[in-house]
Amino acid sequence: MASPGQNGIVRWWSQDSPAGELFVAATALGVCLVEWGQPERGVDPVERLAGLGRPVRERVAELADRWDAYAAGDRSALFDLPVDLTLAGTAFRKEVLAELKRLPPGETVTYGELASRVGRPGGAQAVGGAVGANPVPVVVPCHRVMAADGSLGGFSGGLATKRALLSHEGLFVPEGGWVASHRDD
């Protein structure tokens, strides 16, 4: 399997989204990093990308056009967008995120359901850790993973952002919680 840094260049750019400005980076394999506005982790995202290859500020037209279509209301625009999960870390995290990537637009899943889908029934907490470490939120739709009790659970961009993304995708989200697969049509 190819390493994402083999081509020596990682392209990155800023992108508008329904939830605000994003930092997006891509390798030859696909989108590898999405971060909300200014990084909060204390590490410049460009520095993290340096291990994958030489980071260059250059918008990747096809990928950026898909983001623009999503922002304009095409909720399926990111569904088959290629991703590079190198920054996800462990094989388990990559497996969870690859399964989550298959979740069609307009559908949600609980952490427990996702755990069952990857062959780890009862592994909701471990799946929650993998989802929380998702380096490509929105593209791998971690915002569509809910807690078993119907609450929103967590989200790297904050719960207001999670609610905004779900609403943008046509999913009804009451202020106090949420019921899986309830649509606001």
Image (spheres, rainbow, N blue to C red):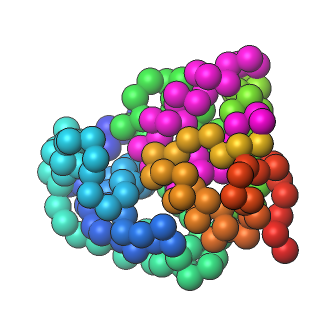
145 within the magenta span: yes
- Which residue: 60% across, 27% down? 127
In the image, residue 98 sits, relative to residue 55, either above or below, namely above
- Does residue 5 appear in the picture of this structure? no
Query: Residue most toward the front?
Result: 176
Residue 69 occupies quadrant: bottom right
Q: Residue at x 36, y 64 (%)?
A: 22
Q: Residue shown at 38%/49% (left/top)?
A: 32
**Location of the N terminus (image quadrant):** top left
Q: Is residue 31 left or right of residue 101?
A: left
The one nearer the camera, 110 or 11, is: 110
Span colored in magenta: 120-149
Residue 41 in view in this figure? yes
Left-right relation of 184 to 59: right
When asked about the image quadrant of residue 123, the answer is top right
**Residue lying at 62% horizontally and 79% vertically, measured from the top left:** 73
Please determine whether, in this image, residue 140 is positioned above or below residue 127. below
* Apparent side of residue 58 relative to residue 181 in the rendered image (left or right): left
Relative height, residue 151 to residue 22 (above, below):
above
Quadrant (top left/top right/bottom left/bottom right) for the C terminus: bottom right
* Tally of numbered discs: 0
User: Where residue 86 sits: x, y (%)?
Assistant: 38, 37
- On the rendered structure, is 39 left or right of 142? left
| Percent of width and height locating residue 156 | 46, 46
Q: Which residue is the extreme one toward the bottom? A: 72
Q: Residue 109 or 80: which is nearer the viewer? A: 109
x, y percentage for residue 175?
Answer: 69, 58
Question: How far across and down, in percent of the image, does residue 170 sit?
Answer: 73, 70
